[in-house]
Image (cartoon, rainbow, N blue to C red):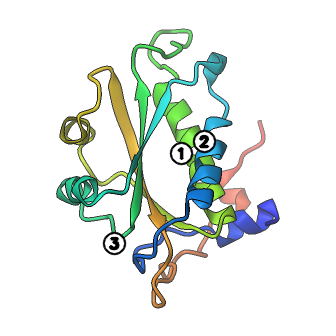
Amino acid sequence: MDFAQVIKDRYSCKKYDGKPVTAEQLSSILEAGRLAPTAKNLQEQHIYVVQSAEGLAKIDKLTPCRYGAPTVLVVAFNKDSVFTYPGGKHSSGAEDAAIVATHLMLAATNAAVDSCWINFFDPEAAAKALGLPENEEVLMLLDLGHAAEDGKPLPNHNSRKALTETVSYL
């Protein structure tokens, strides 16, 4: 699919039909995350694939936002393997994980898989419930699946501010 079309077609799916994501689709999505750039190429991200009934039940206890997706990717990063930027107030962990997550989300659209970026959960509770290592911080969850027949973008999906409102030239 043309990249401009991927960007245009992507939306946050809030209702899935339960049909599984194929192994081929999942592999292409995960590969896109693997190829995402990270600061100093530290690659501190770790992606957890949740597809089992037990794992999905844990996700459902953490957030009401799974929307019936058959697969959830948990995007985390190793807090001990980040680059600290000059000034010492900001590190690469969350930003690199967000870049990885964006690659995953756009690759899903390209693979004909719908997705929804989920931040409505407690990251510490998620890490504990899923048994993640203490040195990892969960950035986000990414629902993956296929939209239900009546699953459509929210009414305001195509509402965007003009570039003049969001971009300034210095």
Q: Which mark is residue 80?
A: none
Q: Are marks 2 and 1 in contact (CB under 8 Å)?
A: yes
- The residue shown at (40%, 39%) is 139
Residue position for label 3: 68
Rendering coords of residue 95 (x, y %): 53, 32
Q: Dot 3: within a 10 Å radius of its alpha carbon, few (fewer than 14), some, or many (20 or more) residues?
A: many
3D distance between C-alphas at marks 3 and 1? 20 Å
- SS label for mark 3: loop
Rendering coords of residue 117 (x, y %): 45, 56
Q: Are marks 3 and 2 in contact (CB under 8 Å)?
A: no
In the rendered structure, which amino acid carries the disc numbered 1? Ala
- The residue shown at (66%, 64%) is 111
- From what the image shows, is residue 69 above or below residue 142? below
Q: Which mark is residue 101?
A: 1
3D distance between C-alphas at marks 3 and 2? 23 Å
Q: Earlier in the sequence, mark 3 or mark 2?
A: 2
- From what the image shows, is residue 141 above or below residue 146? above
- SS label for mark 1: helix
Q: Seen from this angle, which residue lies furthest right? A: 2
In the rendered structure, which amino acid carries the disc numbered 3? Gly
In the rendered structure, which amino acid carries the disc numbered 2? Gly
Rendering coords of residue 24 (x, y %): 62, 58
Residue position for label 2: 33
- The residue shown at (41%, 60%) is 71
- SS label for mark 2: helix
3D distance between C-alphas at marks 2 and 1? 7 Å
Of the 4 image quadrants, the one containing the N terminus is bottom right
Q: Earlier in the sequence, mark 2 or mark 1?
A: 2
